[in-house]
Amino acid sequence: MARYDRAITVFSPDGHLFQVEYALEAVRKGNAAVGVRGTDTIVLGVEKKATPKLQDSRTMKKIASLDRHIALACAGLKADARVLINRARIECQSHRLTLEDPVTVEYITRYIAGLQQKYTQSGGVRPFGLSTLIVGFDPYTGTPSLYQTDPSGTFSAWKANATGRNSNSMREFLEKNYKDTSGQETIKLAIRALLEVVESGGKNIEIAVMTKEDGLRQLEESEIDLIVAEIEAEKAAAEAAKKAPSKEDT
Amino acid sequence: MECVFGLVGDGFALIAADSSAVNSILVHKSNEDKIMVLDSHKLLGASGEAGDRAQFTEYIQKNVHLYQFRNGIPLTTAAAANFTRGELATALRKFCFGQSPYFVNILLAGYDKEVGPSLYYIDYIATLHKLDKGAFGYGSYFSLSMMDRHYRNGMSLEQAIDLVDKCIIEIRSRLVVAPPNFVIKIVDQNGAREYSRRESIPSV
């Protein structure tokens, strides 16, 4: 037993925790995930990599419900995600039991980030290989929140963020195009960000929408296809508008 | 002197419980809700030691919710009843580290799409019975007898409420320290909800 209490995550001479950085690499290889916070709606989107023909894709849900008012999407090692999500779900109910109050988004984010940090400073364990996007509404004030955690255990709140594959491109897109949105506009913004890096089409994207009244709702493939079609039409119209004035010049 | 009783009707199950919280000769309050809504389609009526009642039923409720979040679907009524019985059974033989058996008697009513309405009788020493009608407490001497006389399979809601009222009248007139007020809750395909209250004195 004494053999298993040596730390694996130790400092390098120039102050790096390489195991944590390698974990971030694993995140960078994971599927793209995006979260956008609107005024009354929060949207989580995840890239759905091509499913093998024989696999039942319904069993692989990428966006998890932690409680009635909190949802989580992640990028990275899915097996590690299962463990973290399970612990978070237990903590949500435990909080309700002992404090007669639902958790706030910040509380559960702090809890998950705390868990991820613990595994960078314990013997015989490796860090969790995933970053999470946590969304929800504050149970009392009703304000929407979006938080992100990473393998080092840091967390912060965001208006919109992306993680996983090509997250830099998505984040750039969001920085350029973010504005306060609500309802359908928020969903569109999230899908547009995902479409920057994912092949277009409802079967490659999984979208979940959270509202204060109705909680989390997964969009059907047909609904996503409709919105994608709208976005493509808008893009085409914008392209045409750009080309038309230059035609008149000649 | 706590009275909890319940029965299964046509497409619904109901539980009636008295609403008095008593400590020796003092009535703390007479609008105590002893029937917990376990989830969208389950009711848990509990009687017994007040602290144990709150502690145990809340514990069961949160575990039922956890199952739903973990698995994406709710527990069946039968599964919830067996889980509850299992927790009582485990605590029964644990007389150590400050844990003693829970002194709570439970009637669990639920509605499942495939099975319809069902009622489970779980007493504090982990007896489990699936029943059409059940009752706990001194009031059971009267309510069970009334139900034995008047209950039929597949009663309508009006007939069932009439039977519940008959039981409440018996309890009020024949039980020496009868609780004055009752709560009636039902569960059917539309969910679990409070149906009505029976108040003979304004609640304190």
Image: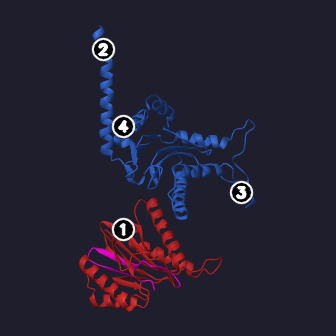
Chain colours: A blue, B red
Task: Give x and y (percent) for residue A99.
Answer: 55, 62
| Tag 1: amino acid | His
Q: Residue at x 61, y 43 (%)?
A: A154
Residues at marks 1 and 4 on the same chain: no
- Which residue appears at 51% of the width and 59% of the height? A101
The amino acid sitting under disc 3 is: Tyr
In screen coordinates, is B48 left or right of A181? right
Q: Which residue is mark 1?
A: B41
Of labels 4 and 2, the one closer to you? 4
Label 1 crowd bin: few (<14), some (14–19), many (20+), radius 10 Å: many
Find out whether the residues at labels 3 and 1 contact each other: C-beta distance under 8 Å.
no
State the residue in front, A216 or B78.
Answer: A216
* Chain ID of residue with mark 4: A
Residue B151 position within the rendered picture, expressed as x and y whole percent measured from the top left: 28, 86
Gap in angstroms between the C-alphas marked 1 and 2: 62 Å
Residue position marked by numbered label 4 in the rendering: A185
Count of marks placed on residues: 4
Query: Quick check: is B87 in the magenta stretch?
Result: no
* Marks 4 and 3 share the same chain: yes
Q: Is residue B90 above or below residue B70?
A: below
Asked if labels 3 and 2 touch by Cβ distance under 8 angstroms, the answer is no
User: What segment carries the magenta color?
Assistant: B1-24
Instruction: Tell which subunit mark 2 falls on.
Output: A
Q: Is residue B57 visible?
A: yes
